[in-house]
Amino acid sequence: MTLGQSRILRAFALSGALFMAQLAAGAAQPTHAAEANARPMVIFDQDAAGPAGSDMQSMLMLLQDKDIDLLGICVVTGDAWRDEEVGHTLRLLEIAHRTAIPVIPGAVFPLLNGRRRTQAWEDLYGKLFYDGAYMSHWPSENTVSWTPLHPTTPYWVPPLPEGKPAIHASTESAAAFMLRMVHAHPHQITIIAGGSLTDLALAAKLDPEFASLAKELVFMGGSFNPVPADNPFAQEYDNNPRQEFNMRFDPEAASIALHQPWPKITEVPVDATSPTLMSRQLLGEVAKGAAPFDHYLGRFGQVYPLWDETAVAVWLDPSLITREKTLLVDVDTAFTANYGATLSWPVGAGPNLGERPVRVVFSVDVPKLDGLVVRLLTAANPVAVRQGSPGKH
C-alpha cells in the first residue's frame, strides 16, 4: 500500500466514523437563513485550477448571483492537485470579498484511476490530449500554466501568482460536508459539479440516502458527438468523440454517481461547450468591469471554452438551452481503449443495471451565454439573473 493510498483509507474511515455525529450536530443548528428566504441553495464541487480560467470564472458566476445561497465550495483534484486548487480558491474569495463562504477539501486521488494507471493506458492506446494534474508538459494551445506542473508531488503547493491566501480551508471533508448539508436541508440543495465526481461517489457510499436527499445534480462532463468548433480545444474530440476529461479522470466515481437516486440530473457535455469561447474580446470586456476581481481576470484570464461557465449558466438561466434530450447515461469502467468514455441509451433501452435518466444539454444560445457571463463577471455587486421569485430554479 502506498502512502497516498494509506491516507485515503484513513480519511475515508474517519469520515465514516464521524459523519453521523456531524449530521446530529448539524440538525441541532438553527435553520439556515436562506431557507426562510426560499433562496435556492447550491454546493459547488469543483476542480479549482487557477488563477482565473473556466474553473474560477464559473465559481465567480455563482458568487455574483444575489438570489442564490452558495453553501460551500468543495475542491477535488482534477485540473490540478487538490491542495493547490484549495489555495487558488481561498485567494479568489479574498479578492472577491466573499471570505465567509467555506472551502472544503475533497478527494486528493480518484477511486481507482491514477497517474501510473493513466500512463499504462496511454502506453496501450495512445497519448491523451489532456491529463490534468498528471500533466508534465502543458498543451501548446496559446495558453500557459500559471504555476509549475508537479505530477508526482500531489501535496506540494507552489507559490501562487495571485498571492498566498490568509484565510484557511475547512477541516471537514467534502463528502461529510455534503452529507451534513443535505440532511439539514433535505430536497433543497442543488449540487453543481465542475470536475470529476469523486466527492459525490464517496458521499454516496458513506450514505445511500445522499443523492435522494439532494434537489438535483448538475454536472459538466461527458461527450456524445461534439461538432469541432473554431478553437484548438475542440479538436480533441475529432478522433475520440466520447472521451472527456472530467469523466475520464475518475471513471469509477462517475459511474457510481450516475447510478444514484438523484431526483433530477442535468448533464452539460462538451457538445454544448465546444462552440463557446472566452475570447480575447470577452476577456477585454471583463477586465474593464467594476467587480472587485476584474483586474485579476484581466491579468490571468485565458482563451478557453466556457466549459464550467456553461454548466453554471444553464442552471441559473435554463432559457439558454436550445437543444436537450433525456437519455440513460453511464461511463465505461472497463480498462480498454474506451475507458472513461460516455455510454448512453434511449430511455427504456439500456442494460437495466441501474442507469438513471439524465437531461443532456446538447446546445445553448452562445451569444446569450456570452452576455450572461460578461454581465455577471463585470457587475460591481451581485445581481439578479432572473425576474420574479428567486426560488424558481
Image (tube, rainbow, N blue to C red):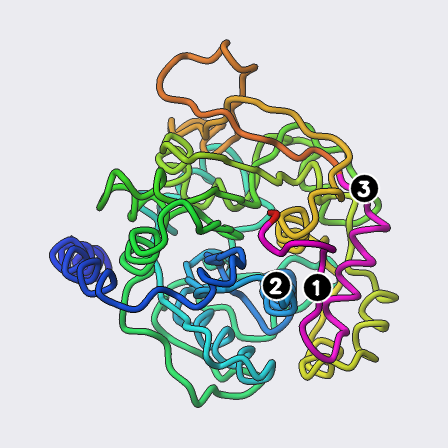
On screen, residue 317 versus residue 188, left or right, reads right
Q: Which residues are magenta?
A: 364-391
Q: Measuring from the top left, give residue 268's x and y in whole percent.
A: 62, 40
Q: Is residue 347 above or below residue 134?
A: above
| Kind of residue at badge 1 | Ala
CA distance for labels 3 and 2:
34 Å
Q: Residue at x 66, y 35 (%)?
A: 361
Q: Which residue of the protein is positioned furthest toward the front in this rendering?
A: 36
Res. 229 in view: yes
Q: Residue at x 69, y 36 (%)?
A: 271
Task: Tell me which numbered mark, 2 or 1, is placed earlier along the sequence.
Answer: 2
Quarter-of-image position of residue 32: bottom left
Quarter-of-image position of residue 176: bottom left
Report if the CB atoms under discs 2 and 1 are less than 8 Å apart. Answer: yes
Marks 3, 2: nearer the viewer: 2
Crowding near the residue tagged with mark 2, few <14, some 14–19, many ≥20 C-alpha atoms within 10 Å: many
The numbered disc on residue 67 is 2
Q: Name the residue carrying label 1.
A: 384
Q: Magenta span has 384?
A: yes
| Kind of residue at badge 3 | Ala
Q: Name the residue carrying label 3.
A: 229
Marks 1, 3: nearer the viewer: 1
